[in-house]
Image: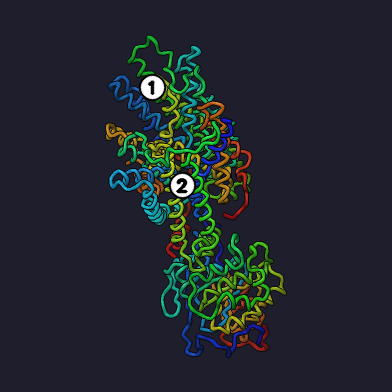
Amino acid sequence: MSLVTDPTARQAEGFRVTRSQRNVAWTGAVALIVVVVLAFFPYIVYSGTTAIMVQGFIVLTLASMWNLLAGYAGLVSVGQQAFVGLGAYFVLILALHGLSPFAALPVAAVASGIAALPLWWLVSRLRSGYFAIATWVLAATIMLVIEKFPSIGGGTGLPLPGFAGMDPTLLTAYTYWAGLAVTVLALIGIYLLLRGRLGLVLTAVRDDEVAARSSGARVGLARLLVFVVAGVGCGAAGGVLAISQLQVQPSAVFSVQWTAEMAFAVIIGGLGTIEGPIIGTVVYMVLQQTLASYNAWYLIILGLVAIIVALFARRGLWGLIDERVNIRLFPVGFWLRTGDAANRRAKDARNG
Amino acid sequence: MAWVNAIIQGVLTGGLYALFACGLSLMFGVMKVVNLAHGDLAVVAGYIAIGIITVTHVPVLWSFVIVVPIMAVLGYVLQRTVLQTALDRSVLTTLLVTFGLSVVIENGLLQFFTANSRGIGASLSLVTGAFTIGSQISIAYLLLLIFAVAVAVLLGLQYFLSRSKYGRLIRAVADDKEAAQLAGADYRHVFGIAAAVAFATVALGGIAFGMYSDLDPTTGTDTILLFAFAAVVIGGLGSLWGTLVGGVVLGVAQQIGAQINISDELLAGYIVFLVVLVLRPQGLISRGVQS
Amino acid sequence: MKGDGEAGAGGDRGDAPGDGTPLLEVRDLVVHHGQLRALDAVSLRVLPGEVYAIIGANGAGKSTLLRTIAGLHRPTSGSIRYDGKDVTGVRPERRATQGIVMVPEGRRLFESLSVEENLKVGATYARPGPWTIERVYDMFGWMQERRNQPTAQLSGGEQQAVAIGRALVANPRVLMLDELSLGLAPVVVQRIYGMLPQILGTGLTVLLVEQDVSQALRVASHIQCLLEGRTTLEGKPADVTADQVEAAYFGLAGAATASQPGEGSEG
């Protein structure tokens, strides 16, 4: 019997590493057009619609953050509502001291990111199940602590000052643009982040953590960075929430329902891709609007759909689309272009 | 004296928390499933009991006999179908699926039963009676009974795990499910049994809680799940009696918090939980791999 | 070539030799680990009462082969027949209850269980047969005394004994031993392999994977060598030369199947 002398075929072919399978300039242009069109909405649609859009922006931002945490960094947090609440309260506190809520928004976002640091220190060593519960407890604890301060409303909350005398239409327009800006910045920020070295590290960790660590990847640092970014993003969303509600109530801003909404949107849309949360948010908003009068139903249906998708269509709706159409709106992966022979060999191996 | 009363209350409440916690610990120890819907299952059991009592007017204590087996069967089925499928996918999926279940259950209860809180058996003298020592110490019969039941359940669980065939299988599968397969055991079936036991204990806890306090659709996550988890963490994962220790520590911490400031009961418990998580994730009784 | 553990005639064997139908037959098994092809069209036939040894270097696919036969791994293609029936799609626990029991690599005892509890688990779904926990205690004299000890307190050799005992009490027809000698002192390994006649005496057939080639040659009645997932040698120990084995093991030119006995055969 002869020896195994099959030389690796790789030497025979060259390889080219590219960033995307199709031309991304197209999708970039389309995205820009979409954003510009959206920006004009306050001029062309009713304020009722913009209000719904603002809700959508909040959920989309939250979903993108949750996706970053769970889909890329492997951190399943059930306590992101902590940052939503913190963002809202930071806006409130700054507004109480005279700053315009819109100006307070970016400050509140940054403050939420800073707040993420000690929280990370508390939970960073915990593994998945523990981590999830710990984030939940943290959120509940933060809410209870905040409720003890009557100066910011105690258990009942406060209306958000700083809008006195503002024209209501203008207010809704500003709120809308604030929401749009936060969402666009969040998506761009995540895209840039994942396109860079952080994205590589996270993907490596996702595939094989031990191997990633041993090849020098700073896993802990990567996760910290993701947690802080998520803190900033969720905090910003919380700020928009406060502005859109014109008040800050602890039970509303710290509700675990936010986590439910962002998690379900991501699961249904597709975990681990930037496009997934977008689709998921759309599904979520459609469901919510259709079933608006049936209160708890949309969460029940959303939850059931999320469970079914998690079990049977792991990559979500975007995954189903992606398999057929093969586009990446936000290309953060790498593609290996190989010669045909290697592809044929790979196919043979698969069919064994 | 009020402090003594508080501490006794706290210790006894620990029994209730242990009832909630042991099922969570079992499911995590055996299947590595963190069941975020655990607390909601207790509430479901309570609601089923309320429903049965309302419709059939059976004596309140009968509800245990009827509901606990129902929940055990539900546990087996849920584990073999939904949870096993999730487990086959990944750890992440089980977390997401149980979270989804939690939300679905809560909103389902909300939809069908409204947000009003309900209790079980408020007219029973057992539920309202207490025996008093001196003028400051009052120990509710119910609380004492619940503590006794909790201890009995833990004893029963310990016996089951250490002596019975299925108890051995559960421990074996928890150690190494492949090796158990090689010995002829279908681990999916064993997982199902473990889930059935977990659901049964949490059902007991849920009905007891419904008698002691009131249930509403969000009680599952607001209170029960966090208490269960806190008790497990404080007492140490993998330790059965640790859940009692954890429950007692939690209960006492809460009562102390309540003595300081009546609204700090929950907060005190959470803080103890967080402190333990940070300092000693293995808990106060760390015994490594045994249960 | 005879060794202490060589299977020969004699003993109260349940499976009668002679008619040549294999108890276990593997045909053209292809197994992948992800994209890596671990086994490439491997075949083997184990006759009742044999001691069939599979040797080969690390990564040759030996353990993969055993694990696939045990049902822990699903083959990409090929078939596994046991006692005339196709078991390729049967779940591992069912194969065990039908009589294919494996002692896995690294022992893999249940750590939170005592020695006796480990045996009891092995006996839970046992087939009827001569092996009982008492009989295992008879074979390993020291075990009964220490039956309530946690297995972590045992030495490597003792743990291996418990692992074998756990498999035996299930009363298998085919006992599979995966890398018995791993991590054990040679003296201990010899002692354990010394038990083989007793085991075979009750009618079992043994399929084993062994890194230690000379040990395998000493106990086996049939031998097969794997290299990078393919069979490079197969035959009776008496019919192969040391050179042939070495060539097959390392994949040197000149390896051949033992269709003709070499001269001056040694183990």
Q: What kind of residue is marked 1? A: Gln
Q: How is the image coloured?
A: rainbow
What residue sits 30% from the left and 21% below the top?
A47
- Residue in the foreground of this view, choosing between B107 and A110: B107
Please state, as top left, top right, bottom left or bottom right, where the C terminus of chain A lies in the image.
Answer: bottom left
Q: Is residue B197 visible?
A: yes
Instruction: Please state the horizontal and vertical placement of residue C195, each as a whole percent of the image.
Output: 64, 79
- Residue in the foreground of this view, choosing between A318 and C113: C113
Q: Are marks 2 and 1 on the same chain?
A: no
Whether pointer 2 and pointer 1 mark residues with C-beta atoms closer than 8 Å, the reply is: no
The label on residue B35 is: 2
What residue sits 54% from the left and 42% below the top?
B247
Q: Count residues near mark 1 (Cα–Cα under 10 Å), then give few for <14, some for 14-19, many for 20+.
A: some
User: In which quarter of the view is residue A278 placed?
Assistant: top left
Instruction: Please state the horizontal and vertical placement of residue B190, each as a whole percent of the image.
Output: 46, 60
Q: Is residue A17 visible?
A: no
The label on residue A245 is: 1
Chain containing the residue with disc 1:
A
Instruction: Please state the horizontal and vertical placement of residue C198, each as a whole percent of the image.
Output: 61, 82
